[in-house]
Amino acid sequence: MIELPYSLVIEATEEPDFFGFYSPDLEGFTGVGHSIEDCLYQAKWAMKEHVELLCQQRLPVPPPSPNPTITIQNARNPAVA
C-alpha cells in the first residue's frame, strides 16, 4: 500500500525516463523522478520535508487529505506564444 498524506499527480514526458510530479493539495510542492516508482518514493519523503519547512517558516500547512489519490497522466504541453 502506498501511503501519502496528500494527493499526487505524476506526469510522463516525451523522455521515457523523466517524470514530473506535484501535489494539488500542497502548494509549491513539485519534483522529478526517473520512473513512476521513483516519483512515488521521492514524493513520500519530500512531502514530509516540505511540511516541515512550511512549519519552520510558520506558513500554513494544509491538513492531510482524508482520501489522497495518485494520478498518472501525460504532461500537458505549454501553449506556444
Image: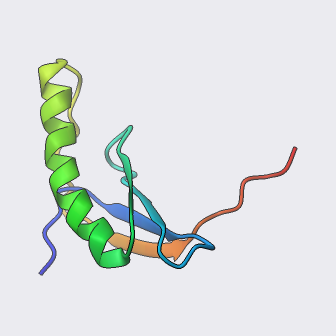
- Residue 46 in sight here: yes
Q: Residue at x 12, y 22 (%)?
A: 56
| Residue 69 in picture, x, y percent from top left | 30, 69
- For the point 44% across and 75% down, which residue is it? 72
Residue at point 30%, 61% (across, down): 7
- The reply, left or right, for residue 13 in relation to residue 3 is right
Judging from the image, the colouring scheme is: rainbow
**In the rendered picture of this protein, how many numbered marks are placed on residues?**
0
Residue at 36%, 76% in the rendered image: 36
- Residue 27 image offset from top left, x and y in percent: 37, 39
Measured as percent of width and height from the top left, residue 46 is found at: 21, 50
Could you say where residue 62 lies in the image, as x and y percent from the top left?
A: 23, 39
Q: Quadrant of residue 34?
A: bottom left
Instruction: Name the one closer to the observer, 67 or 23.
Output: 23
In the rendered view, would you say 81 is above or below 37? above
Quadrant of the rendered structure where residue 59 is? Answer: top left
Is 10 situated left or right of 12 in this image? left
Q: Is residue 2 left or right of residue 24?
A: left
Q: Is residue 64 visible?
A: no
Position of the C terminus, as image quadrant, is top right
The part of the image, by quadrant, that contains residue 67 is bottom left
Pick whichever, 66 or 39, lies toward us: 39
